[in-house]
Image (tube, rainbow, N blue to C red):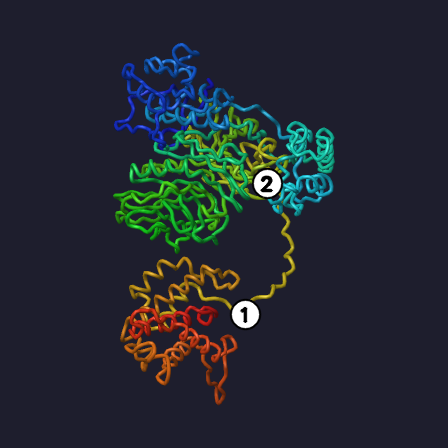
């Protein structure tokens, strides 16, 4: 007997397989939280004076769905008493509205609800895009399901269409063929907009002056099997997009160019000796990406599902919608997201004010993001997401400094810039240039915390104060500061702002739910195994514009009565794409998995590996065809030939290398301590060092030295020189003959000028003086001439003379200030830093 097998993401982190069952109702949760009110504080136009909800589920329907759709500008304009049937938005009796709504919703799979699919078709959509209305409506229904305790995201595994692995065409690795066929058209007629040199810089850069860049950008706009169906052709023929002459003729010219490009690409036939599964494409998969997240207090939510355009829509359902306007060099990425190269996405201050209202009303908040930083060399901090008015004033910011995530939050205990900030420990190098789930919490009782990939990484349990000083005129921005001075480069896959703190369990739930559009691909293998309806199933998603992620493979049969054959072993699993095994990313090549009856469960199958694999994208998610190959499966084997060992390449001559480098952060700290005699544990310097350590050089390569590094060096030098002059014992040791109790005039002018008593000891400590070798006095070639350095420091002292209007110019504090400045200038210079 066959049975449908389902995957259910229940409310919580678990992902389980089970036999298809009916939806559960339930009495709801013990503690019920109402959804946030409209942030504009105005009336929604809904007045309900009818009977009370008869059950908890009716109440959950009202709070989560009816309150949001019964407005006159949404469903309440038609689907009411005396209007169109069904009357699920009626205001006279919530129980009758509930009865009418039930046939239109699927609490187990909200995206399949008729209410969702109807607005997805454009029916009475109240947002600029029908897909945004659909996502928002699904969110309302999901919140209802969550409040009622209903299992959501039920996924039915059903047998896909059997398809043999066939011949196919794949894009060449280089753009030589493209350069002589399609590129002459795109470079001539598309470069004014679609190139990085253009003033408008519109993606994709199919007209780039670099043919390789143009080729990579154009690949997913080309259909190798049907050139006339290529996006490059349809934009001209059907949408009349920037035709350079006659649209029909231009579209035909583009189609002919793509046909010529395709004709030069040979067909790829699968190796007949390979043991291969049935073939599948992403469109053959079962959608796996919905539900499972905690979003009950999300007041701004960005899932980036639209995939194009200049707006990232807020789908939280909390009015006013805080949509983000995308400007500059920002591109949409596959599987939902935007990549920020040199631009940002920013909301208007009017809509951003809902963050101020709804967060200050609770006094707490969480920022949650799925991000892929481009690199680990960004600092500033670079602004991943910020609610601010400029580089020096903000309500909150999630940022990046090298390997650290930074959390700045303005409060009664911070300054207007949200300082001091909380950061992940630099020595742990938590931030990496890969997909990461980041959550920062602000709790007025438990303090601030940073979670990365579900784990608590940093926290400050001191009570951080209230948010009464927040400014409602600031704007929410992603990827840069409001004044465009702190660019962050990377990919934002999801952003949610909650006006309640996410608990550790909720953070784990959202991390386990993952991000992006996912599919279950079921590769048939029954032709090798004496087991009907046997499949190896992968969870697959488009990782970005260039790759797919294959993850969580498991073996299962849809026939629940089937028995596992004796001696079933799966070895050497590889992923194939468009007729050939992929050359890279084969994480399962060493798989050796015996499957026996005692480990196989008919309701859940058996997992094969906890590894993931990144596979390069070829023709695009609509056209790429995948298959699996095996070294051994069931009773068949493939004897894989040994790969030829490539000859060692000729050594590449090393380029010109610098003879000098810079001291790293630990070396800088130790050097300053050695010169001044101030211990590294001195409270003054220890606090400054901990604050600026991430601003100091991390590698000795002088090519990696940044302006921010010099700023950190100078701050630390001032701290050491201040601690030095504050200690009578330490300053007497370094400057034994200098009197710190006299005025500036007496110390540094006239016949009593004692500046050499400061300058020469500093130069000795820096090894900047001439040294004696044998009977000769010589200058070090790696240091400046001593006379030049002495002259520079002396000139600095002259510039430190107290101005006439300064009160009490004879006060010895001016002498101390001149010494600190001279000391910090010497210690913070290249003389100390370069080695």
- Identify which residue, 26 or 754, lies in the foreground: 754
Report the Cα–Cα distance between label 1 and label 2. Answer: 43 Å
> CB of mark 1 within 8 Å of CB of mark 2?
no
Pinpoint residue 828: horizontal percent, then vertical percent: 42, 68
Q: Quadrant of residue 259?
A: top right
Q: Is residue 790 above or below residue 622?
A: below
Of the numbered discs in the image, which one, if any, rests on residue 659? 1
Q: Nearer the viewer, residue 278 or 6?
A: 6
Q: Reply above or below: 61 against 707.
A: above
Q: Quadrant of residue 47?
A: top left
Q: Which mark is residue 202?
A: 2
- Residue 63 location in percent, x, y? 33, 24
Task: Determine which of the numbered discs, if any, sits on residue 649 in the image.
Answer: none
Residue 602 can be seen, yes or no: no
Work out whether mark 1 precedes mark 2 in sequence or the reverse, and give the earlier one.
2
Q: Residues within 10 Å of mark 2 (few under 14, many from 20)?
A: many
User: x%, y% of residue 360?
Assistant: 31, 39
């Amino acid at each position: 007997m066959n049975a449908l097998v389902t995957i259910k993401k229940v409310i919580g982190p678990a992902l389980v397989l089970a036999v298809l069952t009916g939806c559960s109702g339930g009495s709801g949760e013990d503690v019920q939280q109402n959804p946030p009110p409209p942030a504009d504080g105005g009336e929604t136009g809904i007045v309900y004076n009818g009977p009370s909800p008869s059950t908890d589920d009716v109440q959950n329907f009202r709070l989560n769905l009816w309150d949001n759709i019964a407005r006159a500008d949404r469903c309440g304009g038609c689907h009411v008493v005396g209007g169109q049937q069904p009357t699920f938005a009626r205001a006279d009796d919530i129980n009758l509205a509930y009865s009418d709504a039930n046939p239109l919703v699927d609490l187990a799979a909200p995206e399949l609800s008729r209410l969702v699919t109807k607005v997805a078709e454009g029916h009475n959509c109240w947002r600029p895009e029908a897909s945004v209305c659909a996502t928002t409506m699904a969110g309302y229904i999901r919140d209802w399901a969550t409040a009622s305790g209903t299992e959501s995201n039920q996924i039915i595994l059903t047998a896909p269409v059997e398809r043999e692995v066939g011949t196919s065409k794949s894009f060449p690795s280089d753009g030589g063929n493209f350069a002589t066929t399609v590129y002459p058209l795109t470079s001539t007629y598309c470069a004014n907009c679609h190139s990085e040199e253009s003033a408008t810089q519109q993606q994709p850069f199919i007209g780039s002056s670099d043919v390789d860049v143009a080729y990579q950008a154009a690949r997913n706009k080309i259909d190798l099997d049907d050139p006339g169906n290529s996006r490059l052709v349809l934009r001209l023929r059907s949408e009349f997009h920037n035709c350079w002459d006659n649209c029909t003729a231009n579209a035909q010219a583009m189609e002919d160019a793509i046909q010529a490009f395709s004709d030069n690409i040979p067909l790829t036939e699968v190796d007949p000796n390979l043991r291969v599964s049935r073939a599948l494409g992403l469109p053959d998969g079962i959608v796996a990406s919905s539900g499972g997240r905690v979003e009950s207090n999300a007041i701004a939510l960005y899932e980036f599902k639209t995939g194009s355009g200049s707006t990232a829509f807020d789908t939280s359902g909390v009015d006013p919608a805080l949509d983000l306007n995308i400007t500059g060099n920002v591109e949409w990425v596959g599987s939902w997201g935007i990549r920020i190269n040199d631009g940002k996405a920013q909301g208007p201050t009017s809509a951003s004010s809902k963050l101020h209202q709804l967060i200050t009303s609770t006094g707490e908040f969480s920022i949650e993001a799925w991000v892929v930083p481009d690199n680990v060399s960004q600092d500033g901090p670079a602004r991943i997401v910020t609610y601010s008015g400029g580089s020096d004033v903000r309500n909150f910011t999630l940022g990046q400094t090298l390997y650290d995530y930074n959390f700045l939050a303005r409060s009664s205990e911070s300054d207007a810039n949200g300082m001091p900030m909380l950061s992940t420990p630099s020595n742990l190098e938590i931030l990496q240039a890969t997909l990461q789930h980041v959550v920062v919490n602000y709790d007025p009782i438990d303090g601030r915390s940073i979670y990365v990939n579900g784990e608590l990484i940093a926290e400050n349990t001191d009570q951080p104060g209230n948010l009464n000083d927040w400014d409602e005129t600031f704007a929410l921005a992603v990827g840069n500061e409001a004044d465009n001075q702190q660019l962050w480069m990377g990919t934002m896959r999801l952003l949610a702002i909650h006006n309640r703190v996410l608990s550790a369990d909720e953070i784990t739930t959202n991390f386990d739910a993952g991000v992006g559009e996912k599919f279950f691909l079921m590769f048939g293998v029954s032709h090798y195994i004496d087991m009907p309806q046997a499949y190896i199933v992968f969870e697959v998603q488009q990782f970005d514009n260039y790759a797919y992620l294959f993850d969580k493979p498991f073996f299962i049969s849809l026939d629940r009565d089937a028995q596992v054959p004796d001696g079933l072993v799966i070895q050497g699993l590889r992923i194939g794409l468009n007729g050939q095994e992929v050359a890279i990313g084969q994480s399962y090549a060493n798989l050796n998995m015996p499957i026996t009856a005692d480990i196989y469960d008919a309701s859940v199958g058996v997992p094969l590996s906890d590894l993931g694999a990144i596979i390069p994208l070829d023709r695009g998610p609509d056209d790429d065809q995948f298959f699996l190959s095996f070294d051994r499966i069931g009773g068949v084997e493939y004897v894989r030939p040994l790969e030829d060992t490539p000859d060692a390449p000729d050594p590449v001559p090393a380029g010109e290398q610098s003879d000098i480098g810079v001291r790293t952060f630990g070396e800088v700290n130790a050097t300053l301590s050695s010169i001044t005699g101030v211990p590294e544990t001195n409270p003054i310097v220890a606090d400054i060092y901990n604050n600026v350590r991430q601003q100091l050089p991390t590698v000795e390569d002088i090519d990696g030295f940044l302006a921010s590094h010099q700023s950190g060096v100078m701050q630390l030098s001032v701290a050491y020189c201040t601690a030095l002059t504050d200690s009578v014992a330490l300053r007497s040791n370094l400057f034994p003959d200098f009197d710190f109790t006299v005025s500036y005039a007496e110390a540094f002018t006239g016949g009593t000028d004692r500046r050499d008593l400061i300058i020469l000891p500093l130069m000795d400590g820096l090894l900047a003086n001439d040294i004696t070798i044998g009977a000769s006095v010589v200058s070090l070639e790696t240091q400046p001439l001593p006379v030049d350095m002495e002259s520079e420091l002396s000139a600095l002292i002259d510039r430190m003379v107290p101005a006439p209007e300064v009160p009490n110019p004879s006060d010895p504090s001016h002498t101390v200030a001149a010494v600190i400045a001279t000391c910090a200038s010497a210690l913070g210079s290249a003389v100390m830093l370069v080695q």
